[in-house]
Amino acid sequence: MAKRKKKIRLFPAYSDKLIIFCALILLIYGSLMVVSADMRNSVGDNGALVLSIVKQGIVALLGIAALSFACRYNPFRPKTFMILNILVTALLLTTLLFEASSGASAWIDLKVITIQPSEIAKVYIITYIAHMLSYDKGKDDNRKRFYLCCFWTLVYTFIIVVLQHDLGSGFILFGIAFSMLMANRLRYLAWHRLVFFLLFIGVMAAALYLLSPAGTAFLESIAGDNYQINRFLSSANPFKDPYGTGYHLIMSLVSFATGGWFGLGYGKSIHKYMNFPNPSSDFILAIFIEEMGIVFGLIPLVILYFLIWWRLISFSLNTTSDRARLVCLGTVMYTVLHFVLNVGGVTGLIPLTGVPLLLISAGGTSTVCCMLAIGLCELEIIRCRKHKEFYGQDN
């Protein structure tokens, strides 16, 4: 009897196909919009447009490969984490050797490619905390692992915020770690969680103060030529400096108004040709809505994101695996914080932070890392479904 040929699957059995489908649609949607936003750089130069298409195609393929790879490879190996902690720290510090861009030293520019280590650190902190806080070995060991998670979180946050001057990425990494540290079920850590929670409340109180009129006045008194502070102030009143720090936000709001409900059509944005800042990265949502409108642009985008969040949250609430629950929670926070900071920044609801809209904005590192994080969630979903690690029936 002839042996049955083993099927080659891009994504293994038991994976959540809805999450993968939504991620792939967002990736395709984003690639098309980046190419459209790059059209302004290829006026009269078809070669530049072809290069943009090829580049986005490569990024998309790398993202799909990262998701497929993460579905199969288990990164939760204790010995590798000791090495990776040092490696991630070294990558974050390496950015200081390169020239700053937009007030931040957050990139390793190798000319051919540009790497943003803070994106790698965000996904790494998810795997590290999920591993460290997913098994109970007694009072002293639990406390030690909790302290190690806090230590590396603060180290990465310090490097990103203080040394790299990238407030947005630092806030996201801290937010991911905070949510996972608060959600762990290990015994003897109630007091430690309370201390970390109070630290977070203090950070949020400081942020709310800076958003108040008194805080704005304080920032104005010390701003000077500080890029980050001036960007913060522009969200409060972009028309105070319409040709300087407020220009980005004003152009973004005009693009939203131009797009309206149904948009001007794909590739037909007007403002991307008018010295629009970062139309393919930080402000891609403005170009997206100008061309596709609210009905064909914003609403499908929000639905796709919410479907991913819904499936991950639903799974995390039903699984008995602490590691799977923490990985899914960390990934939800990773994508939610990027969404909130990017959308809030380009609409003027919160200060601009320069973080990308994951899977939509240009940026190879952020795209590959996001797909990698989703792949890690799929790995846990596959494992739990195989071993039936659920409170009730697998839904």
Image: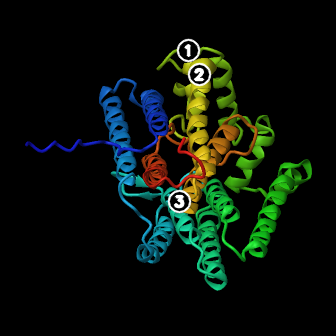
In the rendered image, is residue 276 in sight? no
Indicate the secondary structure of the residue bearing disc 1: loop
Residue 376: x %, y % from top left: 46, 54
Q: Nearer the viewer, residue 376 or 394?
A: 394
Q: In which image quadrant can residue 260 be found?
A: top right
- Cα distance in 3D space between marks 2 and 1: 6 Å
Mark 3 is surrounded, within 10 Å at the Cα level, by few (under 14), some (14 to 19) or many (20 or more) other residues, namely many
Q: Is residue 53 left or right of residue 298?
A: left
Residue 291: x %, y % from top left: 55, 20
- Cα distance in 3D space between marks 1 and 3: 35 Å
Checking the image for residue 69, the label placed there is: none
In the picture of the structure, the residue carrying the numbered disc 1 is: 264
**Mark 2 or 1, nearer chain start:** 1
Question: What is the residue that sits farthest to the left in this orientation?
Answer: 1
Q: Tell me the kind of residue under disc 2.
A: Glu
In the picture of the structure, the residue carrying the numbered disc 2 is: 290
Q: Nearer the viewer, residue 254 or 172?
A: 172
Q: Is residue 140 left or right of residue 38?
A: right
In the rendered view, tell whether residue 37 sits above or below residue 1. above
**Mark 1 or 3, nearer chain start:** 3
Checking the image for residue 118, the label placed there is: 3
